Image (spheres, rainbow, N blue to C red):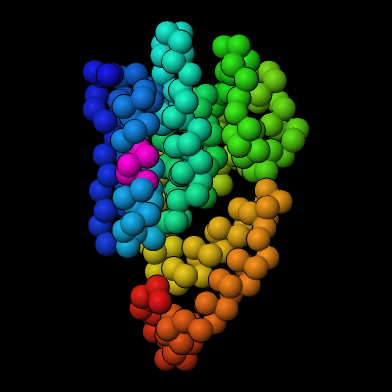
Amino acid sequence: MQNEGSLPTLDIEGHIATLTLRRPDVANRLGPDDLEALHQHVQTVNQSEARVLRLRSTGKYFCSGFDIGKLAAGQRGVGFEPLVNAVEDCRAVTIAEIQGGVYGGGTDLSLACDFRIGTHATEMFMPAARLGLHFYERGMRRYVTRLGLNHAKRLFLTAERIQASDMLACGFLTELVAQDALQARVDTLSDTIADLAPLAVQGMKRHLNAIACGTLDAEALANDIRRSTQSEDIREGAMAWKEKRRPNFLGR
């Protein structure tokens, strides 16, 4: 059990959930207890009415991945990959609020999110090769599908540290904002997404990820398209458009 700080917390307010890492004194590294708590929180979000999940951290650093001390002690972080995969597969749209450094497995946790908003204090590196660690399959797939093969090779095969501007240029960050504007931008993006039709958003998120990985299920896509065209939400959207008002989507 780690003693620095406390376990990650989850807060849900309306359609927006916020998951917070709370080990600032150790750069928000994750031990087995953190992974278990995070996995439970993601499951809670999947079973809730939340349409957006924000991932944020306390302190200077966003996340430094799995606790290297546990690796040295022979623990392989076997729960890390399933946790990051669960974040990628989360029903809600996910936003990483990256206020500072993000390292190791923390970079994959960020890439698993749908949006990654950073500041000029943000930096990253992937030290797997320095540790003698071969990264897991789906994490490498995320790097390649989101950043491209050349950028993935640069980061994995050199363990090079890169700064926020390069992170934006290579696609790791989807947006780069001033430090004092970060939370407001994430709040605005969260509200924007939460106001959209959840059946359409959640279906398109799932199928876009599948297309990127070459695993699209055409039948499942057709079913989701049919479901949305027969939904109450599409009728509400059309009526709100006609009446020039904000729609009230119920996800049915």
Per the rendered image, the range of residues in magenta is: 38-42
The quarter in which the C terminus is drawn is bottom left
Residue at image location 60% in from the left, 28% down from the top? 136
Q: Quadrant of residue 35?
A: top left
Q: Is residue 23 magenta?
A: no
Whether residue 81 is visible to the viewer of this picture, yes or no, is yes
Using the image, determine if residue 242 lies above or below residue 23.
Answer: below
Q: Quadrant of the N terminus?
A: top left
Residue 94 in the image: x percent, y percent? 45, 50
Query: Which residue: 44% across, 80% down?
Result: 233
Q: Secondary structure of the magenta portion, mostly?
A: helix
Taking 122 as reference, is 166 left or right?
A: right
Q: Residue at 68% x, 65% y: name it.
A: 218
Q: Position of residue 235 (x, y in %)?
A: 46, 87
- What is the number of callouts on the image? 0
Vertical relation: 141 (above or below) 43: above
**Could you tell me residue 45's position as x and y percent?**
34, 52
- Residue that sits furthest to the right in the current view: 150
